[in-house]
Amino acid sequence: MRHLMSPLDFTTEELEQLMDLADDMRLHPEQYADACHGKKLATCFYEPSTRTRLSFEAAMLNLGGSVLGFSSADSSSAAKGESVSDTIRVISSYADICAMRHPKEGAPLVASSHSRIPVINAGDGGHQHPTQTLTDLYTIRSLNGSIGNLTIGLCGDLKFGRTVHSLINALVRYPNIKFILISPEELRIPEYIREDVLDRNEIPYVEMERLEDAMPQLDILYMTRVQRERFFNEEDYLRMKDFYILNSEKMTLAKDNMMVLHPLPRVNEISVEVDDDPRAAYFKQAQYGVYIRMALIYTLLEVQPC
């Protein structure tokens, strides 16, 4: 039995196989329509979610399986004080695989150590978001043709943004990746990411504050929102929330083939006028998230090939 806690749980070769499977599922959905017939996915979401939870549910339904679970801690026995380890022991009796989102870092890992079914980390605090990273990698490969030889700008909340942390961890394993880290000083990348991931792997990166200065150099711009739920006080959030706004004027500074990604939801950080730009790939990115999660569920359940 295998779990997914981090994008590093799969080798780059295994990720390629996973993305190849997602391609096949995208192109030939009818061949997988009953692949998980009789299987159940439990979605245990202790935090609000739209795309991640619904894309997991859509993925399982597309595979012919069924879904059960809860969408907030208030609607589960966590509100009564039940521990994550007890919850997963019970869920293991009801479902065949579990996707868990939790505000506390490491909670899905705790669940996996007590589970009798595969557990997928669907986001834990400001730590990791591995299935978003799989979505990001799959989107890059699908639209760019390969992963590698890229200058990637990560913009916004780099301190608390778990999607950014997961993506950096995954991308350092690919050739000739360079990062431009764009954030205000208060939201810079955590020291452990800088030292343990970037410096240790000798990955070139620069930190800057102005998005305009980075735009001409980028192959990919990965925008993130400033996350109200990660701030300790409202005053700091309000001061930082509109620090970066990508608009059509800034897009004129970018390469013709630059790709704009965003894990969504957006608030103000991408103007709606950018949506019609052919380089805006964030809604397609959300769509690709269903296919890669289909491939992941199929793989972790060890379904026999159709």
Image: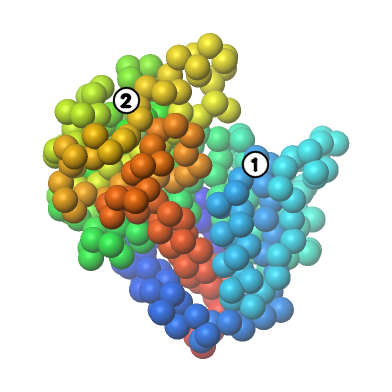
Q: Mark 1 points at which residue?
A: 48
Earlier-in-chain disc, 1 versus 2: 1
Towards the viewer: 262 or 60: 262
Q: Can residue 64 be seen in this view?
A: yes
Q: In the image, what residue type sits under mark 1?
A: Pro
Decide: is 260 above or below 14: above
Q: Position of residue 178 (x, y in %)?
A: 18, 42
Decide: is 229 above or below 279: above
Checking the image for residue 155, the label placed there is none
Which residue lies at the image location 23% right of the left edge and 61% below the top edge? 144
Q: Name the residue under label 2.
A: 183
Q: In the image, what residue type sits under mark 2?
A: Ser
Q: Quadrant of residue 83?
A: top right
Q: Is residue 172 visible?
A: no
- Find the residue positioned furthest to the right: 80
Q: Where is residue 276 in the image (x, y as percent from the top left)?
A: 34, 51
Position of 3 with respect to 45 (left or right) is left
Q: Distance between the residues labelled 1 and 2?
A: 25 Å
Q: How many marks?
A: 2
Q: Residues within 10 Å of mark 1 (few under 14, many from 20)?
A: some
Q: Where is residue 302 in the image (x, y as percent from the top left)?
A: 54, 75
Position of 40 with respect to 258 (left or right) is right
Position of 99 with respect to 213 (left or right) is right
Decide: is 141 above or below 207: below
Q: Quadrant of residue 102?
A: top right
Which residue lies at the image location 69% right of the left edge and 51% below the top edge? 44
Which residue lies at the image location 31% right of the left edge and 65% below the top edge? 142
| SS at circle 2 | loop
